[in-house]
Structures are given as structure tokens and as C-alpha cells.
Amino acid sequence: VAKTSLTSPPWPEVKLPDPAEEAKYHAAEVVRRVNGLISAGQYGRLFAVVHFASKQWKITSEDLIMMDNVLEAECGDRIRMEKVLLVGADDFTLIGRPLLGKNLVRVEATVIEKTESWPKVNMRFWRRHNFQRKKIIESPQTVLRINTIEIYPCLT
Amino acid sequence: MVVLSAARWVRSRLSDRFWRVQEVLKYARHFRGRKNRCYKLAVRSVRRAFVRSTKARKEKKRFLRALWITRIEAASLEHGLKYPAFISNLVKSQVELNRKVLADLAIYEPKTFKSLAALAQRRRQEGFLAALGDGKEPEGIFSRIVHHH
């Protein structure tokens, strides 16, 4: 039969690989290689995406984080951040769905200072109505230093 | 004689007018024109500046989100995906990264962003097959839901 414009659908035909084969390849090749790299320590600087204080942060070791709220921890306390969404190095990335396991990543941070923010002015004004309110807000802030990000070779 | 009321020339007069005026003028020193020197003009300008800064704090969030979306769209187009396809397929694959972090990854970690784009593309193809095939075909691998207990 001759080929017309309607014999095949207009979108490109995509053949996905067989799931059983792909699972075997993944377990054998990919997981083994990444586990080997992790246990050999052949990664440079690690970065992680952490969910903390209702925000997501992209962090590396030795960097500072400031959050606009109070943390119930004294200055100098070591904190472990548990909700890790993504960990990456130069050659591989571990993407969590949505979180990564606690036995896989460890992110440690120290509380450095707890201060108040600069005095922010909150002013409301309606013209011609003799209405103006001025309020000075100093919200509490906490500064954390990310000490280390460690990964362990327990992938499956 | 008995004095029952205070003498008329004793009134309560302001002694710190200078500092009250300086409190307002200090916020106007970087303005342009006479409103950085003259109190009457400065009061109005400073009041408008404060009101605008309070309103801008709410709009900054909207503005930054639009900026992140533009950046993610540009980065995903470099990998051959449009923004709605990218975001919807990432969400369907249970990857809960927000736009701020995706924009940062697109700028500073291009390899990671490429892998995320590949993940979204693969999930998209599996979605199409599931919609078109509609038979006893094997379900895609990236479409499986991960259950946490």
C-alpha cells in the first residue's frame, strides 16, 4: 500500500528500551559504577539541595545560610539536616523522589549567630484620609555554617 | 499675694526640633533635588518611599518567581524541552525541586540540569505511550510511584 500523509502519526515514533533489560543494565552497570566511585572517594566537591525552614537551599560545604526565623538550638550546636532532595558531584547526581535516604547522605551544620534583622519600616498611608501608620520590624535571624556533606555507598 | 495660674509667658516649647527633623531627613539624603534638604518636601517623599518599600516586599516574591521561570524555560529549551513539559514531567516523577533551586542548578550545575531534562523527557515519552497504547503493554519505569512509609 502506498504511503500517504496519514499512514503514520505526525509525531516521531519513539521506541523505549525494554524494562527488564533496562533494570538489569541499571543494577549492574550504573549502580555498581556509582557505588565504586563513592567508596573510592573519587568525587570533588559535593553539593546538595536541602529542604530546611520551609525553603529549599542549594548548599556546599563551608558556606553560610541565613534564615529569617528562630531556631531552638544554642550557638555552636551541630545540626543534621535530614530532608535532602538532591546530591551531586562532578560525575554523578543522586536525585531523590522526593527525598533521599538518611543512610545515604549526611549534611551537618553549626549554628553561628542568632541576631535580629536591620530595622525594616512598614508604613501604610491613605491620601486625603488622614491615615498613616508606621511600624519598625526587626525579625529574628539565624546564621548557619554548613560543615560537611557526606555520602555513603549504599545504593541498590 | 496668691498666684493661682501660671504666668502667661511660661509656655511649653520644643527644644529638640533639630533632631526630630533630622530623623526624617536622614532617610532622604540620597534623594534628588530639594527634597533631600527641605523638610516640608522631604516628609512627603520619605513617606511615599516607605509605603512603596512595604508594597515592593510583596511584589518582589512575584517578580523573582517570574525571573526563575524565565531562566528555567531558557535552560530547558537548550535541551529541547519546553517549560510546561519540563515542570509537569518532573512533578509526575516525584521530584519536588522548586523553581529557585532549578534556576540555580541551570546556572551553576549544567550537567545536573541536563540529567533532569533527560528524566523529564523520558517520563514524557512514557506518558505518551501509556496514553496511546492503552493496552496490556508494560508500564514505563520512570512512571512508577515510589511509596514511602
Image (cartoon, rainbow, N blue to C red):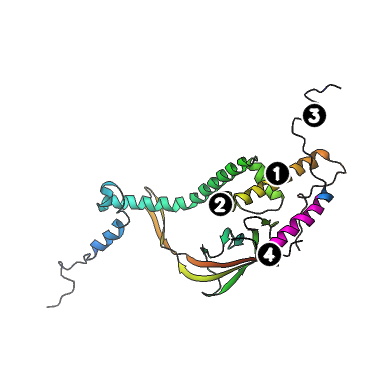
Q: In which quarter of the image is residue A132?
A: bottom left
Q: In the rendered image, which residue does mark 4 sit on?
A: A40
Within 10 Å of disc 4 (Cα), the crowding (few <14, some 14-19, many 20+) is few
Q: What stretch is highlighted in magenta?
A: A22-41
Amino acid type, callout 4: Ala
Q: Is residue A7 left or right of residue B80?
A: right
Query: Helix, strand or loop at disc 4?
Result: helix
- Residue at x-position 35% and y-position 52%: B47
Query: Helix, strand or loop at disc 3?
Result: loop
Question: Distance between the Cα atoms at labels 4 and 3?
Answer: 50 Å
Q: Callout 1: residue from which chain?
A: B
Amino acid type, callout 2: Tyr
Q: Image quadrant for the C terminus of chain B?
A: bottom right
Q: In the rendered image, which residue does mark 1 sit on?
A: B121
Q: Does the magenta stretch include residue A23?
A: yes
Discs 4 and 1 lie in a common subunit: no
Compared with residue B48, is residue A51 higher up or lower down, i.e. above or below? below
